[in-house]
Amino acid sequence: PFGMSGGGGSIEETVVRFPEGYRNIEHLPEPLTVCDPLNPALKWFERKVSSAFEDGRLTVRITCETFRRFGYTYTPDRFEQFKEWRRIITSRGNREVRVRR
């Protein structure tokens, strides 16, 4: 078995305002929701991604929210699911914003 520690919630927002002329988005991270595998109604993590033009400049917002959760011990058959979540969250495509003029 393996454990998942409990923790309080937090929200992190990253806002990127590009210089005028940058209008074409080539790549944004995908929105993502991770829920407790034993109770899918309990969110653990959620990433929201949006883009808009504000004052003529492209603005990208990425909001990551970690929800309050309790510690728990999981059976070994859940380990692969946790590894997959880690792979997705840390992959380059989920940490990168690409735009062009």
Image (cartoon, rainbow, N blue to C red):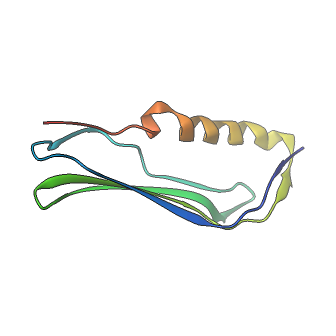
Task: Please name the residue shown 45% across and 39% down the image.
Answer: 95
- The front one of 79 and 53 is 53
The image quarter containing residue 86 is top right
Rendered view: 34 above or below 96: below
Outermost residue, right side: 1
Where residue 82 appears, as percent x and y from the top left, is: 70, 42
The image quarter containing residue 61 is bottom left
Rendered view: 39 above or below 92: below
Task: Please name the residue shown 75% across and 58% down the image.
Answer: 38
Rendered view: 29 above or below 4: above
For this view, does 92 lie left or right of residue 69?
A: left
Count of numbered labels shown in the rendering? 0
Where residue 56 appears, as percent x and y from the top left, is: 10, 56
Outermost residue, top side: 92
- The front one of 79 and 16 is 16
Where residue 33 appears, as percent x and y from the top left, is: 54, 55
For this view, does 46 lie left or right of residue 25?
A: right
Identify the image quadrant of the N terminus: top right
Task: Please name the residue shown 69% across and 67% down the image.
Answer: 8
Where residue 34 appears, as percent x and y from the top left, is: 60, 54
Identify the image quadrant of the C terminus: top left
For this view, does 71 lie left or right of residue 10?
A: right
Task: Please name the residue shown 40% across and 43% down the image.
Answer: 29
